[in-house]
Image (cartoon, helix red, strand yellow):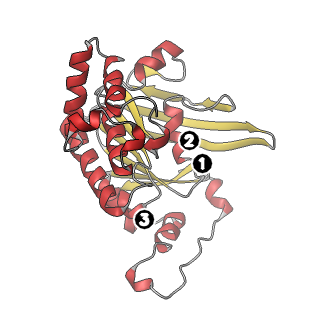
Amino acid sequence: MAQPPLLSVRNLCVRFDTPRGIVEAVRGIDFDVGRERLGIVGESGSGKSVTGRATLRLLPASATVTADRLALGDLDLLGADAAALRSVRGRRVSMIMQDPKFSLNPVMTVGRQIAEAYRMHHRVGRSEARRRALDMLADVRIRDPEHVYDLYPHEVSGGMGQRVMIAMMLIPEPDLLIADEPTSALDVTVSMQVLAILDDLVTRRGMGLLFISHDLNLVASFCDRVLVMYGGQIMETLPASALHQATHPYTRGLLAALPTIDTAGRDLPVLTRDPAWLATRR
């Protein structure tokens, strides 16, 4: 018997009220996330990050979010009050942002921030929270947790800062992790290390992962399923292993625009967008 999804989304719409009028950022999308690695890919402005933030109601007051269903298990996220959302954020669903330098408190040591994240959702003392934070730093493969615990965010590198952010988001032991471009600010070697950490922790804990990225090759190798978004809609849903055999012209255009060794010295094709893609939902 199939397990129910961790997150269920039906007809999700997000609109922003701007000085130039209403902007429809997400236009009636449907998807489920189970205990799997689900990738969302697409160009900048396609609605990927807005979709991730909408699930946790982390959008500004100018945004209007509607859905036929937006549920975390049996909890209606659209109807949840502020107290219910606080209990969900971090404890049941955590979110890793793109750049840890803007997500960490600059005047608190990284260890204290991780420990506080644990104490927010577990009734433990300071010593137990510190022990758990040190264990979590070790889990994200930081070699000297005792030393790093007492560092401030500006004293750690970009790759270590991202590991600290992963530790902070995972220490409350959530069921679902949303990772929004978690490796975009890192070099290739560090990116692979961070992805290996995520893969190991998600697999060992049996979590769900919503992985938002613009890197098609990365998602194809890392995720189980892929949603391809354009103009706030889902163009195509397919197994990640079959991404390079995608049939939708938008996905084919994105794949064709990727540089390869064979294309050296030649111009990359420019994606031609068809207005008809937004006329029908898939």
Tell me which residue sits at (55%, 58%) in the image: 43
- Given the image, on which type of amino acid does mark 1 rest? Gly
Q: In this view, does 116 lie to the left or right of 54?
A: left
- Given the image, on which type of amino acid does mark 3 rest? Ala
Where disc 1 sits, the SS reads loop
Pointer 3 residue:
246
Pointer 1 residue:
232
Residue 188 visible somewhere in the drawing: yes
Tell me which residue sits at (49%, 29%) in the image: 56
Q: In this view, does 225 lie to the left or right of 132?
A: right
Q: Which of marks 1 and 2 is nearer the N terminus?
A: 2
Where disc 3 sits, the SS reads loop
The number of numbered discs placed on residues in the rendered structure image is: 3
Q: Which of marks 1 and 2 is in front?
A: 2
- Given the image, on which type of amino acid does mark 2 rest? Val
Where disc 2 sits, the SS reads helix
Pointer 2 residue:
50
Image coordinates of residue 80 in percent, x first then y, are 51, 17
